[in-house]
Image (spheres, rainbow, N blue to C red):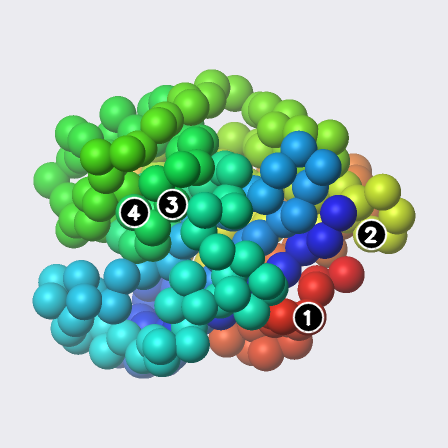
Amino acid sequence: MRVFLLDGGTMMIDRSQLLWNVDCGVRLRFPVYSVLVEHDDGLFLFDTGYDLAHVRRVFPKEEPLQSEAQGIVQQLALCGYAPGDVSYVVNSHLHFDHVGGNRHFQDAKTVVSKSELRQAKVPETFERYAYSDQTFDHPGADFELLEGDVELAAGLRLFETPGHSAGHYSLLVEPPSGQALLFAFDAAYAQESLDRLIPSGFHLDPTAAVRSLRRIQKLARTYGARIFVAHDAAAFSGYRLAPAGVL
């Protein structure tokens, strides 16, 4: 098993969105990335980043920076793969910055929470922009809908961590040797989110979001896992990016 982090570029955010109601008016740049796992059962891609044209059109104030080399197809190529090699696209949730490249994977099965897909199709009014990129439901999309905690394959487990969205999942990778890896995705935007139990400013249910932060902490202790947070520039600077493996 090999694990790669695919760099999808950056956007701007207010710090009060990184950490709910903390330092309003402080702007900072945050990373977006995907996770690629080589596995005996196939090639698994967790999230596909944002579509640059969509963000420029719908969220211009977020000032997206994404070079051609940071596109999801080009990032896969760094690891020696093409879109047709991907067996499963697994979406932690369906917000625009996690599904922008789904449409490139016509031959892959799309794995997502059943409740998340339902919410994405009929979102609350304040969620509509978050779910503005509906291209995850491309003509070739073949959905596998999940409920509850799930073992996708040996050493790949999804744990329910709702709050940021209705059906958010976090990923635990247990390689045959070495330390377990826990990808919190948007359950924890930043390391400070975990340290202070402060969810992101954008959320569906803040109480559930805090409980999910606690669950991430507990999972890390239980499995001795290294935690990877979603949108923390300082943490991201210490991650090994493709074509180097995380392990």
Q: Residue furthest right?
A: 177
| Label of residue 105 in the image | 3
**80 vs 207, nearest the viewer:** 80
Disc number lying in front (1 or 2): 1
Q: Quadrant of residue 117?
A: top left
- For the point 48% across and 56% down, the residue is 82
**245 vs 223, nearest the viewer:** 245
Marks 1 and 3, how far apart at CA: 23 Å
**Cβ atoms at labels 1 and 2 below 8 Å apart:** no
Is residue 119 found left or right of 38 in the rendered image? Answer: left
Q: The residue under label 3 is which amino acid type?
A: Phe
Number of other residues with Cα within 10 Å of mark 4, as a class: few under 14, some 14 to 19, many 20 or more: some
Disc number lying in front (2 or 3): 3
Query: Could you tell which of marks 1 and 2 lies nearer the N-terminus?
Result: 2
Callout 4: helix, strand or loop?
Answer: helix
Disc number lying in front (1 or 3): 3
Marks 1 and 4, how far apart at CA: 25 Å
| Label of residue 103 in the image | 4
Query: Could you tell which of marks 2 and 3 lies nearer the N-terminus?
Result: 3
Marks 4 and 2, how far apart at CA: 33 Å
- The residue indicated by pointer 1 is 244
- For the point 63% across and 70% down, the residue is 243
Residue 111, percent from left and from top: 44, 31
| Label of residue 117 in the image | none
Instruction: Please say if 47 is above or below 106.
Output: below
**Cβ atoms at labels 4 and 3 below 8 Å apart:** yes
Query: Could you tell which of marks 1 and 3 lies nearer the N-terminus?
Result: 3
Marks 1 and 2, how far apart at CA: 17 Å
Q: Quadrant of residue 16?
A: bottom left
Q: The residue under label 1 is which amino acid type?
A: Ala
- The residue indicated by pointer 2 is 179
Q: The residue under label 2 is which amino acid type?
A: Gln
